[in-house]
Image: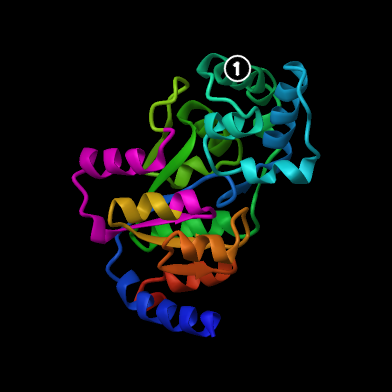
Amino acid sequence: MRNNIWKLRGRFVLQKLQGIDHLFLDLDGTLTDPAEGIVGGIQYALKKLGGDVPEFDDLLWCIGPSLRISFAKLLNTDDSVLIERAVDLYREVYTVTGLFENEPYPGIGDFLAHSKSNGYTLMLATAKPVDVAKRVLEHFKLDLHFDQIYGSSNQGKFDDKAELLAYMLDKHQLTADRCLMIGDTMYDMAAGSKNKIASAGVLWGYGSYEQLADAGADIIFTTVGEMNRCLSRPADI
């Protein structure tokens, strides 16, 4: 029953999507699959710190939240010095090789190109440090489609994606009802909701249907192709 209700809600939201002009896009788990590099970096940091190192699949939940949130939970600590040490160790390997242990999801390049040709403004909104995000996009030549690229600082500013979206709205003087946040985790949906931005969840990343729905997703896309069709302008459908 819940799925049927959600589908009806999704059809209703499709009408609202026709008024969207600006797409705020998450990176990890939405545009690219970064699991190998991120999990490998986390395992490296934990090993260096002498703690328990969970198996690969047990660390996939770390794709989405900021590194500081992930390490605080993994190390069961609120010690900012220890958390920053873990982040620094992670970056020793991730910024050299890990960020390239990554690949765009099939169809993402075409989706970005199509969205751009449809007149959307494309803005990256990631919890990843902005300099690293730029390197990932440039490596896969996805940066060519973006009007703006935003992320956190290495010191942790904008680790909270809700704060990042608020900054983007203010900087570009955008109205929330003309924007759509697209991401794969509850953090993306919550950030959109907090800023009164419609949110679209995607199921090819690392958040579940239930997590996205419970976090306030207005619509959930199961495939890149479905997302591309739903966000096409009327003349292109």
Residue 41, magenta (yes or no): no
Q: Residue at x 32, y 78 (%)?
A: 15
**Quadrant in which residue 105 is drawn:** bottom right
From the viewer's perspective, is 81 left or right of 197?
right
- From the image, which quarter does the C terminus lie in? bottom left
Q: Residue at x 51, y 18 (%)?
A: 80
Q: Can residue 163 be seen by looking at this rendering?
A: yes
What is the count of numbered marks?
1
Residue 29: give x, y in percent of width and height. 59, 49
**Quadrant in which residue 207 is drawn:** bottom right
Task: Give the answer, above or below, for where 84 lies relative to 160.
Answer: above
Q: Secondary structure at mark 1?
A: helix
Which residue was labeled with disc 1?
88
Residue 166, magenta (yes or no): yes
Task: Give the answer, above or below, for where 96 lies relative to 187.
Answer: above
**Quadrant in which residue 132 is drawn:** top right
Task: Report the span colored magenta.
Answer: 159-188
Q: Can residue 237 be seen by looking at this rendering?
A: no
- From the image, which quarter does the N terminus lie in? bottom right
Task: Give the answer, above or below, for where 68 lies relative to 198.
Answer: above
Foreground: 195 or 21? 195
